[in-house]
Amino acid sequence: MGQEQTRVVVTGIGALTPIGHTKEAFWDALMKGTSGGAPITYFDATDFATTFACELKNFSVEDYIEKRTADRMDPYCQYAIVSSDQALKDSGLDLEAIDPLRIGVVHGSGIGGMTIYDQQFRQYLNRGPRRISPFFIPMLIPDIAAGQISMRHGLMGPNYATASACATSLHAIMDAFMLIRCGMADYMVCGGSEAPITPMSVGGFNSARALSTANENPAKASRPYDRDRDGFVMGEGAGSLILESLETAKARGAKIYGELVGVGATADAHHLTAPHPEGKGAMNAMKTALSIAGIKPEDIDYINTHGTATPLGDIAEITAIKNVFGDHAKKLSVSSTKSMTGHLLGAAGVVESIACLLAMQNQTVPPTINNDNIDPQIDLDITPNEPRKRKIEYALNNGFGFGGHNASLIFRNGSSL
Amino acid sequence: MTEAEIKDKVYDIIVSKMGVNKDQIKPESKFSDDLGADSLDTVELIMELENEFDVQIPDEDAEKIGTVQQAIDYIVKK
């Protein structure tokens, strides 16, 4: 490389999750081992194979966004506004003092506006094509959240969405990192949001046999690494990070949550929805991230896994970890945030990166809850049921999506910077 | 329906779609300049009028409806 690379750090966090609507509430809930699972209230799910999900609870959009503005956003976009507002505020950035061309947004969604799609398709069937709202398309498209964030704050730098299913927001963070490194922007708002608890997406994921059907006990249904896991639990929400160079962060005296030191992205090139059985793509993503970070596998203290609680996916990822980390795999801590939040699809990656950053800040690994009988094939320390204090200097976060997209990020603890 | 009733309903639609107070609306108010409607809002307002009053407003007519009074007159005439 020769030339010194820009070091990129996280200076702002926003989290809107089923177990907490701020980063503080989210962390408290992680430490208490809170489950977000409950019966679906958004529609009558009686006839669905799965009747529960991790909805945002006690959330009213009017508390955050003026009504007329909110009315022109699908929930997935509203959530992105909430988390990005929080992150910008948390960063302490003075937007008046920054050249608007130097601050951009990469904010993704795995699916986009499912609620508005369901609603407008019904309108079309019942009332005909002339009754389709002029706002339908700009509410539906998965990039509109990035656009809306830019309009709300006047951010005129690079602006787009990533889409890689459940790896979406990790790719968004990765892109933001690269945009800063290549010099196109000084500050980036990045992350993802998802509002998939609608009849068509619950039904669709049910048909793909991806969701848990443990309807009798929603709070216990998301059980990564447990013998009785039977699929993921759908969640919703959003997460946003503010990235900037270490230099600007230090110059303005910003608090630094962590440094994004390594990124890796690969493909399985294997199957529409199933992971590669040995997690080949996942393995390559982690190796790439380690290599870009310039650190050894032994440096990693904590892995926040994709860990969705599908029977195949959990095994494939653990196999990949063992292949990458060898003997060290047994010494590092592993946990799945999805045991508590459910699976936030396009927002999962960023929310779990936030879990990594807060874990480093608190030097505590959040647990994997609902582990009553750990699957004997899972022979790593998955931090069952209770959080654990330990040294965390480097944390790695995995995210994988339908289509075989794999992404891994490595963060370094910010307190030593 | 009397003209007064039509006017009332038109005002209600504008309040609900444009997020303005009723007392901000005057007969001569322009949708774009005075009530803050952009091109998408205008299409939506016309659709709401069609819906509420069960009329068809072709695009060439819709283009001529620029003020609140013009909207009321158009509905009355239909």
Image (cartoon, rainbow, N blue to C red):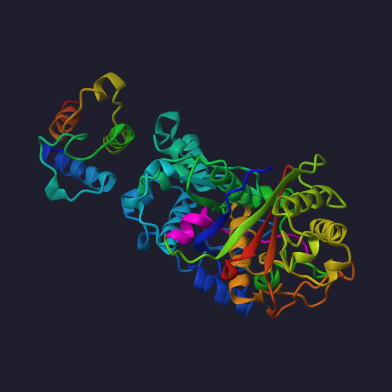
Tell me which residue sits at (78%, 60%) in the image.
Answer: A296
In the foreground, A57 or A384 = A384
Image quarter where the C terminus of chain A lies is: bottom right
Q: Position of residue A334 (x, y in %)?
A: 75, 68
Left or right position of A273 against B23: right
Counting the numbered discs, the total is 0
Residue A234 in magenta stretch:
yes
Left or right position of A115 against A170: left
In the foreground, A202 or A394 = A394
Q: Can residue A342 be seen in the rendering of this structure?
A: no
Tell me which residue sits at (16%, 30%) in the image.
Answer: B76
In the foreground, A244 or A73 = A244
- Image-quadrant location for residue A220: bottom right
Tell me which residue sits at (67%, 61%) in the image.
Answer: A233
Q: Position of residue A23 (x, y in %)?
A: 51, 68
- The magenta segment is A229-251
Tell me which residue sits at (61%, 48%) in the image.
Answer: A5
Left or right position of A120 against B23: right
